[in-house]
Amino acid sequence: MENNVLVSIIVPCYNQAQFLDEALLSVLNQIYTNWECIIVNDGSSDHTEEVAKKWVEKDSRFVYLKKENGGLSSARNLGLDNTKGDFIQFLDSDDCMANTKLELSLQQLSSTENKNAKVAISNFRMFIDNPEKTSAPYCELNSKLFNFENLLYQWEESFTIPIHCGLFEATLFKIFRFPENLKAKEDWVMWVSLFYKNCETVFINEPLALYRRNPDSMTMTKNMLPDFIKTCDYFRQFLSEEEYHIFSSLLISRYYKLNEYYKSRWSDTKNSNSYQTGLMVKKVLKTAGVLKLFKRFFPFILKFKAK
């Protein structure tokens, strides 16, 4: 494909300087070369700025922006406000892309059979430390999933789409901005909002996006319930009454099923031989008057065992 369109790659960063080099290297290694990469430092307290400026000095296609900490949504929005490209590629600072990501996505979007498509979505694989050593994705993506109903009703039940799987026509973001009151679920809002207007897509069944399994990421360490509730309120602003009723009913049904599942697991645990044995031991210790003594010394036993 000729380098006749500019792709704007937005990389929000917050205290993940240890991963940033790998993310930006995957940008530099893109076979398609007509891109700009906007690195947005969201008030990091680590050496993110040092890493970012090194890449700006290395290649003028990298652009560095710094702002006070405001969250992932505000960082992406600042990136969107400063793009010049015809297409938008999001890339979180701990993830990577295959070197053919931009090239193959643009090829598909420029083909005659996909002339109405505005988004190219690729498949993905996962990695921990080395992007060259990947594992199977946490969900199976296919083209039948990419419609408004599935994105709204089946998100996190059947699948989610890592945001860097997509390459987006820039016109989609003339109006849309990520809700800055959300610290999570903002990607779900984006997908639903874009597809609410019957956004056509093309699916590339190749793992062009590489998703890092990071145990310290916000989604692994933060309570997501407040943001989930805010997201539901956000959807209520533009969904029809019928759509929101279906949405609410599904959420209630999922909660009920999950509650029944854990009740069943707890019942099975209480009826298990190991649990009953534990109760019997506890009763014997209590009767013998040594339970309190055992509780006092048990933490010391654990510390000794750890050594």
Image (cartoon, grey):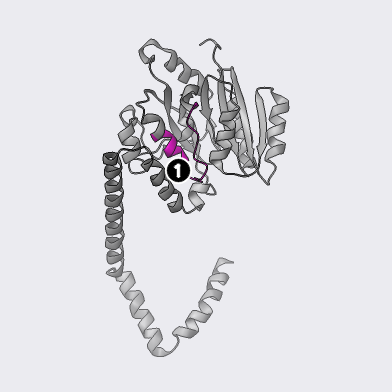
175 falls in the magenta region = yes
Residue type marked 1: Lys
Q: Is residue 7 visible?
A: yes
On the image, the x and y values in percent for residue 11 come to: 58, 33
Give me the residue at 27% from left, 58% from top.
260
On the image, the x and y values in percent for residue 139 come to: 37, 38
Of the pair 123 and 244, the residue shown nearer to us? 244
- Magenta segment, principal secondary structure? loop
Where 165 sits versus 276, above or below?
above
Give me the residue at 34% from left, 77% from top.
279
14 falls in the magenta region = no
Give me the residue at 55% from left, 11% from top.
4
Lateral position of residue 114 relative to residue 35, left or right: left
State the extent of the magenta-drawn residues as a range. 174-192
Instruction: Please state, as top left, top right, bottom left or bottom right, where the C terminus lies in the image.
Output: bottom right
Of the pair 78 and 38, the residue shown nearer to us? 78
> Could you say whether the residue bearing mark 1 is in a helix, strand or loop?
loop
On the image, the x and y values in percent for residue 217 come to: 53, 47
Is the residue marked by circle 1 packed among few (<14), some (14-19), or many (20+) residues within 10 Å?
some
Q: Give the labeled residue for mark 1.
A: 185
Which picture quadrant has residue 264? Answer: bottom left
